[in-house]
Structure formats: structure tokens, C-alpha cells
Image (tube, grey):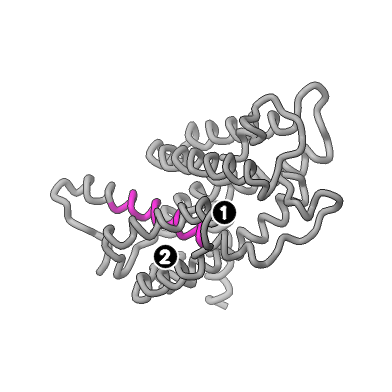
């Protein structure tokens, strides 16, 4: 019974951490079923995301530091969207005033919502890292994963090599988190896989409600290829590495003497 209660509690904390993504999904569904005259759907989604972001910061659900991280992810995601749409990987077929080279500005918030989830879950579950690798390994690995999303269109796709490097670099790494006063431990690589899989499920929901459109979904919606899990897995790794590095820098600065409170 205690294990069941802990699982429910863990699920509740996860649900609270997913508030921003849930609002995005709900908005996608509502705007799909109930369009507003004279206002393109993509522009309405942008307004909703901006208002939601303001509301979360104003009422203390997100800190100003977390807002900076989320803004960074918005820009990283928007850059990736601009390139991928240009290369024909997917498209945004609906009209909108707030579109740049075929990409609606609200799309960056879908990446920002991943950062929002990570920041929220980190704080709510009091996440700590065990045996976190040095930045000289983490930084170049994150950069290589992100760049591969671009370079594989012109060169070989090295995602599986990068995935192997992730396993090697983080083989001894794990995370601990707290649920109702009890701490639990999970291998870091497993947490990457779980988050990536659930984002793939979320991607299917998003494309069903027309958030964007893959070439094979032009005539009718179909399930997103399971192979996309690998892409989301790598994106989650980049997101986690950035958030973890920024958290580590802030921890050092707050201590004033550079003491690392991440467990080793």
C-alpha cells in the first residue's frame, strides 16, 4: 500500500511539473475543435503560450532563473524548427501572421515546455546528481548531439554513435529524487529513455491535433514512427545536460566559494 501511495504521489508531482505541456496540448485540442474567426490558430496558440508563461512566473510557479532557461530553449528549438521545416522534415500548413519562413513562433514553446518540465520536476522532486561527468565531457557531447540534428542532412547520421557515447559517459551516473520524504535512485540513462518515450507519445497527440505535420501525415494522420523516439531521446539528453549544467553553475555561485554540492 505504501508503494502504491508513493507511486500516486510521484505521478501527482510529475503531473504538476507538466503543467505547461498540458496547457499546450489542451490549447491544441480546443483550437482545433473551436476555431476563432479572424484570428489564425497558430497566432492564438502563441498568445495562449505567452499568457501561460506570464501567469506561471507572476504566481511563482516558475522562477525568473527558470524563465531564462526556458527562453534559451525557446530559441534553440526555434532555430531547429526553421532548419527542419526548410529541409522538408515537417511543415506547418496553416496560415498565421506570426510565422517566420513557414515556422509559427508558438513552436518554440513546445521545446520550452520540455525545459519547463525539467525545471519543475527538478525542484519539486529535489533532484540530485550522482557521479556527474565533468563539463569537458558533457559540453562537447551536448553540442555534438544538437549539431547532428543539422549535419545529418548533409553528412552521415551519427546518432547511434552519439547514443553509445552517452551510455559510456553516463554509465556510472544516476539521479536521486524525493517523494514524500523518501529518496529513490534511478540510472540517468534510464531516465533519458523514459522521458524520450513519453515525449514521443506527446508528439503523437500533438500531430493528431495539428501542431505540425510530417510528410506522411499530409493526407491523413498516422502514428509517428517509433524511430522518432531516438531523436527525442537525444533532444532530452541535450535539454537535461543544459539544465543540469546551469543548475550546477548556480549552485556554485550561491555557495560563493565554488563548492560542488552535486554528489560524487
Q: How many residues crowd around disc 1 within 10 Å: few (fewer than 14), some, or many (20 or more)?
A: few
Q: Where is residue 206 drawn, in percent x and y?
A: 71, 50
198 left or right of 143?
right
* Distance in Å between CA atoms under marks 1 and 2: 42 Å
Q: Could you tell whether 188 is left or right of 89 in the image?
A: left
Residue 102 drawn in magenta: no
Residue 260 is at least partly visible in this image: yes
Question: Mark 2: few, some, or many residues within 10 Å (few <14, many ≥20)?
Answer: some
Pointer 2 residue: 178
Q: Compare marks 1 and 2 and give the one earlier in the sequence.
A: 1
Between 33 and 142, the residue placed more toward the observer is 142
**Residue beneath the point at 44% across and 59% down:** 125
Q: Which residue lies furthest to the right in this view?
A: 219
Q: Residue 99: give x, y in percent of width and height.
A: 65, 30
In-image side of 258 versus 65 (left or right): left
Q: Quadrant of the N terminus?
A: bottom right
- What residue is shown at x 69% (from left), y 29% (from top)? 43
Q: What element carries label 2?
A: strand
Q: Is the magenta stretch mostly helix, strand or loop?
A: helix
Between tags 1 and 2, which lies in front? Answer: 1
Query: Does residue 206 sit above or below 45 in this rendering?
Result: below
The residue that label 1 is drawn on is 153
Secondary structure of the residue carrying numbered label 1: loop
Residue 24 position by quadrant: top right
Total marks in image: 2
Drawn side of residue 125 relative to residue 262, left or right: right
Amino acid at each position: 500500500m505504501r508503494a502504491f501511495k508513493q507511486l500516486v504521489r510521484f505521478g501527482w508531482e510529475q503531473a504538476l511539473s507538466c503543467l505547461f505541456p498540458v496547457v499546450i496540448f489542451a490549447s491544441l485540442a480546443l483550437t482545433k475543435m473551436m476555431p476563432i474567426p479572424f484570428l489564425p490558430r497558430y497566432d492564438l496558440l502563441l498568445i495562449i503560450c505567452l499568457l501561460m508563461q506570464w501567469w506561471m512566473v507572476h504566481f511563482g510557479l516558475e522562477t525568473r532563473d527558470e524563465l531564462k532557461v526556458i527562453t534559451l530553449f525557446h530559441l534553440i528549438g526555434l532555430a531547429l524548427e526553421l532548419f527542419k521545416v526548410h529541409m522538408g522534415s515537417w511543415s506547418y500548413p496553416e496560415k498565421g501572421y506570426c510565422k517566420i519562413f513557414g515556422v509559427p513562433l508558438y513552436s518554440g514553446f513546445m521545446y520550452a515546455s520540455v525545459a519547463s518540465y525539467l525545471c519543475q520536476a527538478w525542484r519539486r522532486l529535489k533532484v540530485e546528481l550522482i557521479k556527474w561527468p565533468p563539463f569537458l565531457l558533457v559540453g562537447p557531447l551536448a553540442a555534438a548531439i544538437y549539431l547532428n540534428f543539422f549535419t545529418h542532412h548533409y553528412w552521415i547520421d551519427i546518432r547511434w554513435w552519439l547514443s553509445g557515447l552517452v551510455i559510456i559517459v553516463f554509465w556510472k551516473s544516476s539521479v536521486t529524487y524525493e517523494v514524500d520524504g523518501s529518496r529513490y535512485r534511478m540510472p540517468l540513462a534510464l531516465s533519458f529513455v523514459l522521458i524520450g518515450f513519453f515525449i514521443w507519445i506527446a508528439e503523437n497527440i500533438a500531430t493528431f491535433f495539428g501542431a505540425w505535420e510530417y510528410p506522411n501525415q499530409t493526407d491523413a494522420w498516422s502514428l509517428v514512427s517509433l524511430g522518432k523516439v531516438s531523436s527525442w531521446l537525444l533532444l532530452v539528453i541535450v535539454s537535461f545536460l543544459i539544465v543540469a549544467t546551469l543548475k550546477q553553475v548556480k549552485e556554485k555561485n550561491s555557495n560563493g566559494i565554488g563548492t560542488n554540492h552535486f554528489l560524487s
